[in-house]
Image: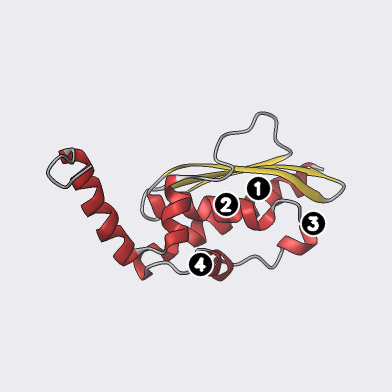
């Protein structure tokens, strides 16, 4: 399609994409547009909900078998950075033992996403705190 024949929406989307690429890494943009393990879970072994300082919420759901996180999902009503951080938490924890994930930190999320702008670091903190609250929910229930 030539520039003249481009749909006005396509031009706007391209401008938005170019602007976002100045602020966010390719990986963050990818996860925000293509979330991994996003969705609520019925009958999880552990779950948690936290509303962050910015108003975004994060939910984490866990299935743990033989001390291994076999399923993990998240749901958020938040910005793209929060979606990316939720995806990152699930990618970094699925298939790991509880002992292996106890050292997870917001820095791990930020590094996995190839960085986050300063104003979005709280999104990584929200994701990690919600994850640990879900682990605690599991630990106290079993």
CB atoms of marks 4 and 3 within 8 Å: no
**18 vs 36, nearest the viewer:** 18
* Disc 1 crowd, CA 10 A, few/some/many (<14, 14-19, 20+): many
Q: CA distance from mark 2 to mark 3?
A: 17 Å
Is label 2 in contact with label 4 (beta carbons under 8 Å)? no
The answer for how far apart the CA atoms under marks 4 and 3 are is 21 Å
Residue found farthest to the left:
4
Q: Which mark is residue 97?
A: 3
| Mark 4 / mark 3, whichever is N-terminal | 3
**Are dots 1 and 2 in contact, CB under 8 Å?**
yes
Nearest to the eye among marks 3 and 1: give it. Answer: 3
Gap in angstroms between the C-alphas marked 3 and 1 = 14 Å
Q: Residue at x 62, y 51 (%)?
A: 90
Residue 24 lies left or right of residue 4; in this view the side is right
- Separation (CA) of disc 1 from disc 4: 20 Å
Say which residue label 4 marks. Answer: 110
Quarter holding the C terminus is top right
The circle on residue 38 is: none
User: Total label count?
Assistant: 4
Residue farthest toward the right in the current orientation of the protein: 66
Left or right relative to 20: residue 81: right
Q: Nearer the viewer, mark 2 or mark 3?
A: 3
């Amino acid at each position: 399609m030539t520039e003249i024949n481009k749909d006005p929406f396509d031009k706007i989307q391209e401008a938005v994409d170019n602007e976002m690429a100045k602020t966010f890494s390719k990986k963050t943009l990818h996860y925000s547009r293509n979330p991994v393990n996003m969705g609520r879970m019925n009958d999880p072994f552990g779950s948690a909900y936290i509303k962050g300082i910015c108003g975004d919420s994060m939910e984490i759901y866990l299935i743990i078998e033989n001390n291994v996180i076999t399923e993990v999902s998240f749901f958020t009503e938040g910005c793209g950075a929060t979606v990316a951080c939720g995806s990152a938490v699930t990618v970094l924890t699925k298939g790991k033992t509880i002992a292996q994930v106890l050292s997870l930190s917001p820095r791990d999320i930020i590094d996995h996403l190839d960085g986050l702008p300063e104003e979005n670091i709280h999104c990584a903190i929200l994701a990690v705190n919600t994850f640990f609250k879900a682990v605690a929910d599991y630990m106290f229930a079993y």
